[in-house]
Image (spheres, helix red, strand yellow):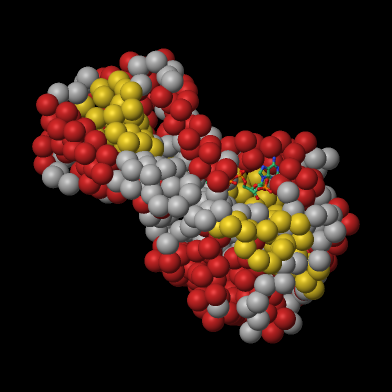
Amino acid sequence: MTNTLNGNSLINGEWVPGSEGEIKALNPATEEHLEPVFSLIGADQLDAAAQAAHEAFPGYSATDPTERADFLDLIVANLEDRREAIVDRAKQETGLTEARLNGELSRTSNQLRLFATVVRSGSFHRVRIDPALPEREPAPRADIRQRMVPLGPVAVFGASNFPLAFSTAGGDTASALAAGCPVLFKAHNAHPGTAELVAQAIHEAITELGLPAGTFSLVYGPGAKIGQRLVADPRITAVGFTGSRSGGLAIARTAFERARPIPVYAEMSSINPVVVLPGALESASDLAEGFVGSVTGSSGQLCTVPGLIFVPEGPEGDKFVSRTVELVDAAVGQTMLTPSIAKSWAEGVEHMSAQSGVQIVARGQDGQGSNAPGPVLFETNAETLLVNAELQKEIFGAASLIVRYREPAQLQEAVAKVEGQLTVTVHATEADHDDVAALVPRLENLAGRILYGGWPTGVEVGHAMVHGGPFPATSDSRTTSVGTLAIERFLRPVAYQDFPQDLLPAPATDANPWDVSQSIDGK
Ligand code: NAP
């Protein structure tokens, strides 16, 4: 097992030094640079990586369920062997705590294991068979069989805020590999060492199992140059991205303007509204604690952090706001991921404070070290939200806006004005259910996940999870980037008409050697 860093890109199974400059990771808590130097690739090297992925596709996509699932399981074993080194490096590069990073690595492993079970079960082939009806009048029916096939090489962009679970071997990579697609991963420049350690685990699994070398590549380079070139490369067939709205949109535009456009699954910005109904204020004693914990955990740098909360006017609402103010005033900032993310957070706070009708009502203490600003709480009312779209801008980090509303009708109106979200959370009791029932159709239009009680931070990885939602939460609301449904982003259906059994793909044959579930005549 290797776990020393070489600072190179992984292209076609080789660690290759880049030819276009270099970067060093930065510890955001101390603002010290970390060794080693990571070299950035040029256009020729990207071309070689794309070619390797293209050449790997036929062999890798033809792997049977056991080979592919074993590959995913072996990546997990290799990651777990490196756990200490990965967590230690990620801690230095991101300022996130050891506990959070250990949890994130476990989640990454569990995600890969879950996709291994999906691959073994074969459910993703979604085989449908309409048997021939030669006697049918007025015209006979041909034998038609459908199954899902992988798209081809997928470009994945890692997220700054999840250096493991949404990065090198994270959800996009796991679902693309499970689908049978090679992955070309553009590392986030904020955690290059973590990316390399994880890539070593994947590379070792590829080598040990004798899979095509281009099944996975890791490249370092600037997004605006190498990232754009990657998306434009004709051998790339889809993109998975997590990051800013501007980055996601720039990638989507390039993908759409190609001679052959491709799908982009970009998870971008979400403020995850929470809707508090009067009954919840009377019955729940720890609502303010739960809310502030969800806003401030991981410095608020989670895509599901609640950046907006609707609270009724009146004495119970006032009590909730006072308690929330107390808690935020007492909170201490934690190191943010990078100096530039801390700077955009501060700019976002300034921009929000400058909006008419918005006040800062609480501000926590700055934390130790650099880039650890105290969390901030704003307050406004529903009338102001209704007329100013700026209030819906994501402030990535620990900040949230309390919106006071007068009555259910005003809440309905305000909720209808909110743009697309990953999540929306309702706090209510049975006494509020008529109002909640009236809200539900709006909430379905608004978000990919609707919670009744609880807090949106913390996303379960399972079969039923949706981590997606209408724009600008994502670029494609029809799917999810977390959970097993994510595999479908990298598959497309093919129908085989009147094919002889010996030419059909294994899962679509009558013999069904992989024992996958087959729907026959719709049953
Ligand atoms: P980002 O700037 O969008 O970067 C994400 C990745 O995309 C990086 O690898 C970046 O490469 C690349 N990229 C950026 N712009 C690109 C472009 N025009 N073309 C091709 N590739 C491009 O996101 P970030 O660095 O993670 O964070 C910056 C801001 O994004 C945060 O302050 C926050 O506002 C937002 N954010 C939101 C979420 C969320 O979950 N909602 C998560 C993370 C970040 P380079 O770094 O090399 O440019």
Q: Quadrant of ligand 1?
A: top right
Q: Is residue 377 left or right of residue 61?
A: left
| Residue 523 image position (x, y, % from top left) | 49, 60
In the rendered image, which quarter contains the N terminus?
bottom right
Q: Is residue 51 visible?
A: no
Residue at point 78% right, 45% down?
225
Give whichever of 72, 508 is nearer the camera.
72
Q: Is residue 280 above or below residue 96?
A: above
Residue at point 61% right, 70% down?
198
| Residue 157 image position (x, y, % from top left) | 64, 53
The residue furthest right is 44
Residue at point 73% right, 77% down?
211
Q: Is residue 477 above or below residue 110?
A: above
Q: Which image quadrant for residue 506?
A: bottom right
Q: Is residue 181 left or right of residue 382?
A: right
Q: Is residue 207 left or right of residue 69?
A: right
The mark tally for this picture is 0
| Residue 141 image position (x, y, % from top left) | 67, 54
Give whichever of 160, 95 is nearer the camera.
95
Residue at point 43% right, 26% down?
352
Q: Is residue 228 visible?
A: yes
| Residue 434 image position (x, y, % from top left) | 20, 31
Q: Is residue 143 left or right of residue 400?
A: right
